[in-house]
Image (tube, grey):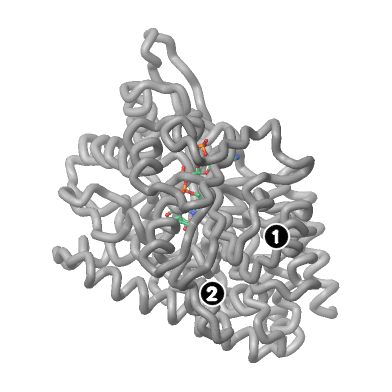
Amino acid sequence: MKPSKQVEEVLQHIRECSPGQNEFYQAVDEVLFSLLPLLNEDSRYREYNILQRIVVPERTVIFKVNWLNDKGKIETNLGYRVQFSSTLGPYKGGLRFHPSVNLGIIKFLGFEQIFKNALTNLGIGGGKGGSNFNPKGKSENEIMKFCQAYMLELYRHIGKHTDIPAGDIGVGAREIGYLFGQYKKITNEFDGILTGKGINWGGSKVRKEATGYGSVYFAENFLNANNDSIKGKICTVSGSGNVAIYTIEKLYYLGAKPITCSDSRGTIYHKKGIDLTTLKAIKEITYQSLEVYAKIHHDAIYIPTHKYPKGGHSVWHVPCDIAFPSATQNELTLVDVKALYKNGCKLINEGANMPTTPDALEFIKEKGILFSPGKAANAGGVATSQLEMSQNASMQRWTFSEVDIKLHQIMRDIFDTVYKTSIEFDSKGDLIMGANIAGFRRVANSMIEQGAV
Ligand code: NDP
Ligand code: 2IT
């Protein structure tokens, strides 16, 4: 059977077996189609049925989470952990707490995580989890209660050699703290079963900053390969969470000017540059809306979502040299990318997971805009999680600069691997193909070596 036919069969099959999982189909479609040059060249992947096998998670856990709200009422949410692939190491990937979470979203994230983790060249498999719990508007006590109830079930599925969750949307240092405390209470063991832990109790320096810093390091490598650099660039960033904040911080360190950020209610455009101290205070300490930013900085413009262009997001309509989508999936649409192109944007560097819609990706390829896929550009977070595991296992504590130097090197190596792979398959500069093939090849070859398990 021709590889293209086989790919189509697998895509058809996942639609029949797992109905309604649109984000999962989107992630799988992108990966499998971009593997065609490799599949045409090497028949082993077909002989060993790798495609059919790799799209099925090794284990999917779905559980009920009952917790007591401040009024003493029991609330119920769904909890998930999808343990997708343990081929390269224990399952590794974040937890997302957001009302939009469903099985299809967790599966898309877990699927992407397999290849991202493979690209780091470290020993980590792929997994993802979370809940449809909405942290917005909840008290500190309710968040703690929810985290404890969630861990009361999750604890039996994780372990330092089995599965090591971390943060993602809605799960930051605070939630990791409550989750860890509960795990320790249940098991009576102080174990490195989560990453993103507090610095005083087993966390690693730079883990908080790692995804954002790593994303900027990746962009710098890509620009350098094109005889350019970050210095002096005007940058638009979406989101205002963990990834966005530390992308903005590193952009300033490297002499660029980040002029936007956004949240689920609106966008801030601050022409003279985003004030990082205000942003951190609003998003890391008081957990407020970005509207507050514009009340503090009168020269900043706040655009609420109801004023966004039809089918698009205002953040991408501000002229820039580089765009850093760093909020969520499908946040950069065809309408948006057309505006970026018209305004002369040179590079789109994905900090979030799958932020670009498929039609926007087509347009990007057609126009030859430089593009860094998330599974390569945002891999600095999970890579630094592995550095945290490594410190926990060896009972060491590395300094900020020791970890940062390692992160910097890992991002360079990922870029080199992805870039060289794109050249190997005659698509110089198509880093989507480079990332998917390089990640897949490492996992698939290892699957063949490990036999039918
Ligand atoms: P945070 O929860 O810290 O921040 C998320 C940001 O995105 C917030 O500003 C949030 O706004 C906004 N956002 C979330 N969902 C939506 C939505 N549906 N519509 C509009 N805005 C939205 O998450 P992170 O910064 O950790 O994650 C951001 C992205 O990066 C995600 O795609 C995540 O999967 C990815 N990622 C994260 C890594 C990490 O280490 N944390 C590693 C690699 C990738 P609001 O506060 O209003 O909800
Ligand atoms: O998407 C991701 O890579 C993350 N949310 C981080 C995962 C991790 O285990 O650090």
Quadrant in the rendering for residue 296: top left
Residue type pointed to by label 2: Val
Residue at x 57% of width, y 61% of height: 350
Q: Which residue is mark 1?
A: 340
Name the residue located 24 percent from the left edge and 37 percent from the top edge.
Answer: 181
| Mark 1 Cα shell of 10 Å, populated few (<14), some (14-19), many (≥20) | many
Where is mark 2, residue-wise? Answer: 443
- SS of the residue at dot 2? helix
Q: Residue at x 40, y 42 (%)?
A: 279
* Position in image of residue 68 (x %, y %): 38, 16
Rendered view: 309 above or below 140:
below
Could you tell which of marks 1 and 2 lies nearer the N-terminus?
1
Closer-to-camera residue (344/399)? 344
Q: Nearer the viewer, residue 195 or 332?
A: 332
Q: Is residue 345 left or right of residue 128?
A: right
Tag 2: Cα neighbours inside 10 Å, few (<14), some, or many (≥20)? many
Instruction: Kindly tell me whether residue 29 is visible in this rendering.
Output: no
Please identify, in this view, whether the residue under mark 1 or under mark 2 is nearer the observer.
1
